[in-house]
Amino acid sequence: MMKKSWVCTIVTQVSLCLSLYLVLNLCQNQKPILRNGNDNIPMDIYFISVSGGVRPLEEQTLLLKQVEKVAKKFNARFVINISELGEDDPLVQNATRHFPSTKIPWYSTRALKGQGLNHYLRQFKFAHGSLDIIVVDTGLYQDASNGAGDGQSQWLVDTLENSESKWCIAVGIHPLVACEDDATQMELKHEFRSLHGVFLKYGVDAYISGQACDDNVEKGPVAKTKTGTTRYKGPLLTKVNQNLPYSMQNVNGFLLHKVSALEIVSYLVSLEGDVVQKIFLHQRGKDIM
């Protein structure tokens, strides 16, 4: 009986040593998630774009919970909030106040604090290059006759000419496209033809804005349907190439974007947390599908 117990002890110890050896070797053979051991340079970049504005408390809470969940799961670097209210937008204020885990940078389509201009550049590095986020004040193009947008246009051209980033995404409040009467076909707005031309010339990969098609929605600070029920939609992702425009589903939610070496992939996420659409933006010069 003692001999059997001694043999079991030896077998157990050998098994434990072998298991430890395998674990150590497997760990050593794992490829690092970050290049060159630099914790500040991830392999890919994830970020979120969302439409702000005044929302019912229940809806806003549900939206922020989903943004928080997705941001934590994918380690999102930042959030782009599309709103005319800028940093005073209630969505931004409540996100940082009630959802501590979403205290990643929130950028707005209005001037950052301490800056007077509503256009700016933010660059984010990753292992395969860098991503430019360029925010433009599309309101300046509403009436081009007064030349209000000339200074921004020159800044935009200079910024794009001097950029060496692999990817570039522009952001603004107004969509580049307008809906026809049937709300299914879209065409480039006349006032944004010059802006789109700059995007196209310098290889901007995509443009994020507010929604273009407001079928049965009256215009106003808070969009309401003709039945009087408030309706909100997520941001619009427009591809910047000769095949513009591009149609997305009208969903109350937000976009999760993944930027990698070969492509940008965007996921349209509903308030319920469901991915209702997946959009691929392949290497520069190819289409979103």
Image (cartoon, helix red, strand yellow):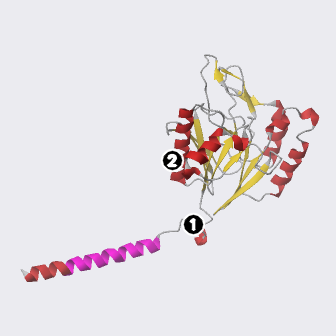
Residue 13 falls within the magenta-colored stretch: yes
26 sits to left or right of 274? left
The N terminus sits in image quarter: bottom left
Identified by mark 2, the residue type is Lys
- As drawn, the label of residue 188 is none
Per the image, label 1 sits on a secondary structure element best described as loop
Q: Quadrant of the C terminus?
A: top right
Q: Measured from the top left, where is residue 238 in percent x and y?
A: 69, 39
Query: 228 and 203: which one is in front?
Result: 228
Q: Earlier in the sequence, mark 2 or mark 1?
A: 1
Q: Main secondary structure of the magenta part?
A: helix
Q: Front-most of 184 and 52?
A: 52
Disc 2 versus disc 1: distance between alpha carbons?
Answer: 23 Å
Q: Quadrant of residue 140?
A: top right
Q: Which residue does the numbered mark 1 point to in the structure image?
A: 34
In percent of width and height, residue 161 lies at: 83, 55
Q: Residues within 10 Å of mark 2 (few under 14, many from 20)?
A: some
Q: Residue furthest left?
A: 1
Q: Is residue 7 above or below residue 176?
A: below
Q: What SS does tag 2 mark?
A: helix
Image: 9 above or below 227: below
In-image side of 48 versus 144 (left or right): left
Q: Position of residue 208 (x, y in %)?
A: 69, 41
Number of the label disc, if any, that sits on residue 69? 2
Q: Is residue 193 visible?
A: no
Front residue (pair 190, 233): 233
In the image, what residue occupies the spot 61% across and 26% down?
231
When asked about the image quadrant of residue 223, the answer is top right
In the foreground, 259 or 54:
54
Front position among marks 2 and 1: 2
Q: Amino acid at mark 1?
A: Leu
